[in-house]
Amino acid sequence: MRRNPLILSGFALILGNNIAASQTRFEWPSSKIDIQSYKYWDSCIGVRERVGDSVRFHNDEIADTLHYKVNNGKNKLDDVIVSSTRLCLEKFDVNKVDLEDAIAFHQLLLDAGMDSMAHELIERKASSIGIGNRKALAGLFDSAMNASINAMPVRFQKSIEYYNRYVALGDAVGPSRKIYLLALLSGSVANSSDSVYNRVLIEKAAELAENLSDTEWNDKPGLELSLFSQGLVKRVYISELSDSLLRNFEAYNNYLATLFSTHITRKTNRSLESGYYTIGQALAPVTGHYWIPANPEGKSFPQKGAISLLIFLNRGKRTSELGVLVLAKRIKERYPELQVVIVTQTLGHLNDLNPPKPEQEAELLGKYIREFSQLDAQVVVYDTDFFKLPGYDRRRINLPTENDLAGYEKARLFLVDREGRKISSGANERELEYLTGALFRRHVNDTQTTR
Amino acid sequence: MNKHFSRRAAISHGTVSCAAFVGSSVLYPQILLASGRRPKVPECVLDGAQFSQDPRIRALIEKGVDAALRQRAEYCDVRITHTKTRRMGIGSRPVLDEEEISVGVRCLVGGYWGFASSPVWTEGEMERLATIATKQAIANGKMLAGQVKLAKSETIRNANWTMPIAIDPFSVHPNQIVDQFVGLLEFGNRQPGCRGFTINTRFKCQDKAFGSSEGSYITQRSYLTDGQIKFVFNSTEGKQVASSVEGLSPAGVGLEMFNEDRIRSEIILAIDKARFISSLPSLPIDVGRYETVLSSSSTASLLSGTVGKATELDRILGFEANATGTSYLKDPQSMLNSEIIGSKDVTISADRSLAEGAATVGWDDEGVAPRKNNLITNGILTGFQTNRETAAWLNDSKSIDITSTGCAYADYGISTPNPFSGNLTMKSSESGENFQSMIESIKDGIALDGINVDLDFQQSSGLASGLTYKIKDGKIVSLLQGSGILFRASELWKSVKSVGGANSRKSIGFEYSKGEPSKTYAHTVVGVSLVTEPLTYIDITRKG
Amino acid sequence: MRQSNTLIDRIISKSQSEEVVGTIGQLAGEDKSRVAVQILSWWQGESRWTRNRINISSDRRDIRVIISWRTNNIVGKGTTNQLDKESLEGALAVAQRSSEIGNPQKRVDFYTPPPKVAIPEPLIWSDNTYKDPLDERVSTISSLCTRAEEDRLLSAGYMEVRGGSMATFEPWSAWPDSVQYTMYTQAQCSTTVRHPKGDASGWAGLSSFDWASINPEKISGLALDKCLQSLNPVAIEPGRYTVILEPQAVADIVSPLMGPLSNRQGAERGDPPFGGVYEPSANVILSKLGLRIVDERITLSQDPSDPRLGIMPKPGLEKITWIKNGVLTALGHLRGYGLEKLNENNAEFPRQSYAMSGGTTSVSDMIESTKRGIVVTRIWNVSTIQQSSVLCTGVTRDGLWLVENGKISKAIRNFRITESPLFVLNQIEDMGVPIPVFNPVKNPYSPQLWPVIVPAVKARDFSFTSTVDAV
């Protein structure tokens, strides 16, 4: 930079003799992180989170999907996070930890990969509680089980052990909580490749569900719906489900319908005919005004003869839904023939852009979705009708799209078979992968399925 | 995995990841090997000790003083500051670092002040600033004779002072502080009923050099640390109490303010208090007069707002008339050593050498060493808070030799100095009484714990509201909502019936602004618990 | 922005800002698209007087360079007031370190930067202010002091002139290659004249970007008259009185409304005072937009192109009318909310500058028509004690008189007030001609120009809750 005589009269941009230049520059006493000086073990939670954040923030791939952590907590922690946590934690004597903090410390030990110490801590806590206080013990095993599940899939054996000890406490634990924990476990099993425990869990869940009294069900309104529709039906039976689908659609449908009748209709007075059960429903072609890439022949989607994954974005904030695209990409990598159709709609705004015209919004959306997801997908954009609130309010109120009215409003994701029937609308990656695999393999075996 | 790490990731974890690699061969080598996108941070040039010894700083000051004297200045002083500020918040904002350096030259010509300042430290700039400052002073005196005189002051030829703190906040890596703060918050959130713990801090370190035409040359390093820890307590009955941890307010300390042992026990105390509050019924105030117990923090708020500001002599003289106001102590000549402004149990002193005080300095911004100054002794007004200019005024009027009490303060070299209130201390009694025991002594009354004080522009008529307890037969029976005390400062301190013992003392830091242009200042007030005669309680939201 | 004819040598110019930005860009190297810079500079000439003498005159200047570093969704910041390469390098380094543990922000660089909307050019620069009228300033003050001395009163006051600049460079903005630069000036003068015994006080003041529009003699004369008229105040009972609020008092009590008026998002979440009811058919919460909330003579607006209402320019800054003929017609919001909810690319930028409609009645006419009431010069230290009704408290200061049978009968002691601006604006009897009042920029490091233009107002049932000692 050249010296500017004008500036010399007031501010000095660069001055060889400006003493300030040698005093400043944030050269605050150089400091390093002295992890050995940490006095309390819970500062190691700070280490784990800070290192974890930094790994995430500075990893361009993960940072893009920052807001939608697929499989939250079930993935193996990054090695640098594990080793930093361990380095911090090693100096703390597990035998001196206040047993009041056992659960939190246990979690941290697991995150540091110090499993045996973690389990020892639970044993010490259990013996300090004593066999007499079964309620407190139940709480302990419940938490310990959760911590193990959340850490990483390889710990399922341990979590099931905790579960068994939990159940063994008999009356001290409520049946609905048992089922809830089972759902948690089974959900995790479904996500892991380890299906050994599947059958055991299914049997336990079914047994418990059968034994629940009506009062117990009524105490927990909505529990059965969330458990059975989200947890057990979709996850626990995953291998049976995919096996049945592999045989034929009818077997699959029967299997699910039986489950539904057993576990839901009886408890909720909802019948198969009430419309709640929608597997096998023939899905209408999606409607859209803009197609990316262009669809000059006016093909309809889902296409007859193709196995399709329909993804609906826009049910809320668009950016918070993009995680599902990451999932779709991984499935598509395994089954390249899978036809992915992403349906979205204009909202009249696109981040900080000047309110775009529908065609501009559609074009940008198509470009963004296809580039973000790195998916060779058909993007369909519906030009949403809206009205404006009158007067000074002027707010834009979007109207439901034709797709919403055609039965697509209830879920974000639909797996569709070659006959255009809905096979699943769950967004569980493992389940989708199994079912998609079954659909592709079935085609080879048996193309003649009837509804 | 296509991971893309920058060098920042490695640097931020510093020893963490590096040390981790020692015993492990499989971790990401790219963290270690990634290179060079980050600009190189220069080596440490000068730390605080060197600032004080750097002959160039002294040379700058001498240059400024000499230039001013050459241009007819009768007196001149120069302030140079180098200030580092770090703000941190967990759960709300990242680390924000700021740095400023500046210099100001003040000259006295013909009883008028002139001042010039800038962020440039060169000899040429010192010459320019001295010229402008004298030009300003001379211009001021073109029509009327000036009035400014300076009280005598000891010349300090070459001295250095560093605020005694335990841990320099800037010597600890900010990420390490983040780890420890996260640990504190985790600790808090683990406690039954607690959630939403947040922590915010500000650390300030300032190197300051002062020199004057009287031959003084002083360097000093001071620290100011501030913070809040807030949380929400949910009682088992479903009541919510928004709470904060006590003992965190501006103070002349370092990172030890966040001493983990202490903060952890403070967190437990704050939770106990929140639990107690949530257990009380909440009632509207029955307007009237009630005997009152003030907690030490409430006393401190009232002291800072009333006596602290009212004894600033510049306010009394009208220097602040067009800004934050004057004082209810209107007549300094006749009031000194005779005016009764409190009960005989009330003794209040100001002292900028108080240990850990937010306003504590080695010398003030006119090179005056602070001294303990009894503002009120056994209820009688015995002192004012002065700088050299206002002390000289009092000298003239009282015909006695009064020196400055060392209250001049300029936040940065860029600003002109103004007098502010020193750290205040209310003398405790020998009684051993505290907030709790005082409550037990009340049959029917009110206790105030932690209040906001809203005063008029002479520090006299005030409205104070905060956490208000109803006392019945020595016990707290309920909370009172929407109530406040309406008071007159002179009557408030006269109504003090009993003063708590040393065990009820608490130091609280307060910030306030003053001057034209406005400057912000912090001082510490040491309060004790008090019992007063009945005070007037109103519903603060009721209109007239 | 109007060009200056004066040599700009005390604040950082556009080309100097560009040089600094260029240096920082070089330091960041290949990462320069991650770096944003804001450079603020200011110069001030000040004179403070007290006890009928100037106490100090000063000439001060400073800089702030705020460097932001963005990594993916995180922004870190470092701030310095030095322009040499090493200092900028240091600030860049701390910005980078700070970005490591920041909170993730919403992605703002979707595909295209925000649109290039017009940046208005409000009138906020005056050579009159920047030319540093030191001699004029001190001789004016000296004559004000002389007059006060002749009247055996004590005058104190403050005059300030300022020039400032703000340069912004953001690679992810609509101007990725250029520095956006603004210069502004600001002048203020206020004075308080007191009786030596401390039993009377009068105040007057004005702020403007243009020093030439401030008449110190007039201001001083007003303060002096007010002081003389305030001698021997008597205490009267607190309670509800008809008030004649002088423009400064109107600004003091109306300004707390600007917060809620700037929060459309809050109102549409249901927050009082402008939040409304749930409308199930559209699944929205309706605000009070479109409802009459104050007297129909009241219009509250801000037009940055009005030379008396110039504020710091921003892309898309436009006129806003919050209240039109008593009806709530707009609430402030940021552009994101406008795009998302209104499908309009318009922020209704929050601002503390406003103009209020008025009438033609003079204060003396208001007094004449009043049987019993109180004239208020200004209200000091106003704070909101109840958000839902914008109930405020504060104290009257520097001139308070009782009106009886159409005449000022006596000076009275100050009161604490407990009142809501919404109540006052619903109890209007009469209004005067709107004029600019005193509302100067406080913090030079955050340059906000907030000119306010309001009329004198006569209103019923204003609530004075207790007397205060201060005079």
Image: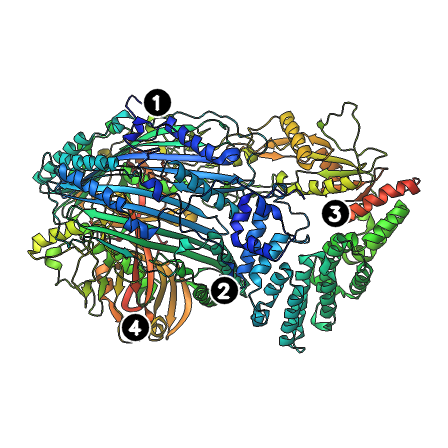
Discs 4 and 1 share one subunit: no
Distance from Cα at disc 3 to Cα at disc 1: 61 Å
Image position of C48 with respect to B309: above or below: above
Distance from Cα at disc 4 to Cα at disc 2: 34 Å
What percent of the width, then of the height, locates residue C121? 39, 25
Q: Which residue is mark 2?
A: A39
Q: Which one is nearer the viewer's eye here, C75 or A229?
A: C75
What percent of the width, then of the height, locates residue B351? 24, 60
Distance from Cα at disc 2 to Cα at disc 3: 42 Å
Which element is circle 2 on?
Answer: loop
Q: Which residue is mark 3?
A: A429
Which element is circle 4 on?
Answer: loop
Task: Indicate left or right for B76 with A184 as reference.
Answer: left
Q: Which residue is mark 4?
A: B501
Count of labels shown? 4
User: Residue under mark 2: which chain is it in?
Assistant: A
**The label number, if any, that marks residue C2 in the structure image:** 1
Distance from Cα at disc 4 to Cα at disc 1: 66 Å
Q: Earlier in the sequence, mark 2 or mark 3?
A: 2
In front of the other: label 1 or label 2? 2
Discs 4 and 3 share one subunit: no
User: Residue under mark 3: which chain is it in?
Assistant: A
User: Residue under mark 4: which chain is it in?
Assistant: B
Quadrant of residue A350 in the image? top right
